[in-house]
Image (cartoon, grey):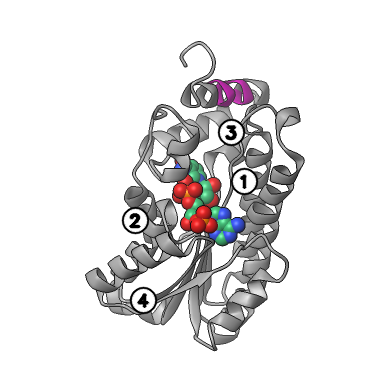
Amino acid sequence: MNRQSFAARYGPWALVAGGSQGLGAAFAAEIARRGVNLALVARRPGPLADTAAGLRAQWGVQVQTITADLAADGAADLLADELHGRSVGLVVANAALSPAGPFTALDAGRLSQTIDLNCAATALLAHRFLPAMIGRGSGGLVLVSSLAGGQGVPGLAVYSATKAFVICLGEALWAETRGSGVDVLVSSPGAVTTPGYRETATRPAPGTLTPADVAASTIAALGRGPRVIPGGLNKINAMMLSRLLPRRAAIAIFGRATAAALGEGPQG
Ligand SMILES: NC(=O)c1ccc[n+]([C@@H]2O[C@H](COP(=O)([O-])OP(=O)(O)OC[C@H]3O[C@@H](n4cnc5c(N)ncnc54)[C@H](OP(=O)(O)O)[C@@H]3O)[C@@H](O)[C@H]2O)c1
């Protein structure tokens, strides 16, 4: 799709949740280069301001920054207020937490925050912004999941469960919105070199991609939902894990790969 058609279908504004760094900032750049203005949401104002300034300078688009905790009650309504009636044609639900470690060792508050952000906030963003797009007969919704959502992942139990939620939510919304002019897409990346990944992982996993690669292949797949898996090796791995291997083997393999990336286990 060329720049003009993209802006007509998914503009004039796109909202990127968690748009200040990592994959969210890469989504913002991928969208800005197609001439769509951006509203970026995150909690820390500094990284938000830096990313916004870079996008304005490089692509000449308007960028609004919204400092908000998406896991807080009423966050989706607050965003809608902050947008002051701007027409949002594309929402990227990208913000997530990924607490690592044995389930019983995780702090209960952190666990609850992860479910609030990864599941509730994602669903509420979709619920808040989809109706206007459906009413206009055009728009897009990208829900960022993970290969970890394809099976339970020991060491990332809650994270993998929340990402399974995102896959099911997105697939259902894709089906519900078919024919409405609104494109819903779930993106399930493998490992991506983001600040968040570097905080938890000590080494790259096989098939690790850059944020720019993942954002580019996801945006290119918009309209071809329900789901995209960026990267050739990741597609093959996902097919093996979900279709060819017994469930318990898939859980064990993903768990070993995760332990190795986190610097635990025999390879760590
Ligand atoms: N990196 C990977 O290897 C990988 C693999 C598969 C899937 N993914 C998915 O890709 C997405 C982005 O991951 P990432 O690695 O780019 O993460 P990241 O580097 O940790 O960045 C997360 C972004 O979300 C914002 N954020 C976090 N909590 C928030 C909250 N409560 N309210 C508002 N904003 C919040 C952060 O800004 P503030 O901290 O300032 O709020 C930041 O902009 C996630 O959905 C993740 O599950 C990542």
Distance Cα–Cα, label 4 vs label 3: 36 Å
Residue type highlighted by circle 2: Ala
Q: Is residue 212 visible?
A: yes
Question: Which residue in the protein does label 4 denote?
Answer: 36
Distance Cα–Cα, label 1 vs label 3: 15 Å
Please rate how many residues cluster around mark 4, counting C-alpha atoms within 10 Å: few if below 14, some from 14 to 19, many from 20. many
Residue in the foreground of this view, choosing between 131 and 68: 68
Q: What x and y, as percent, mark residue 246?
A: 64, 23
Q: Secondary structure at mark 1?
A: helix
What segment is highlighted magenta in the picture? 250-256
Question: Which residue in the protein does label 2 denote?
Answer: 216
**127 left or right of 2 in image:** right
Give the quadrant of residue 24.
bottom left
Residue type highlighted by circle 4: Val
Residue 163, label in figure: 1
Magenta stretch prevailing secondary structure? helix
Q: Secondary structure at mark 3?
A: helix
Residue in the foreground of this view, choosing between 182 and 29: 29
Residue 242, label in figure: 3
Q: Is residue 228 visible?
A: no
Residue type highlighted by circle 1: Lys
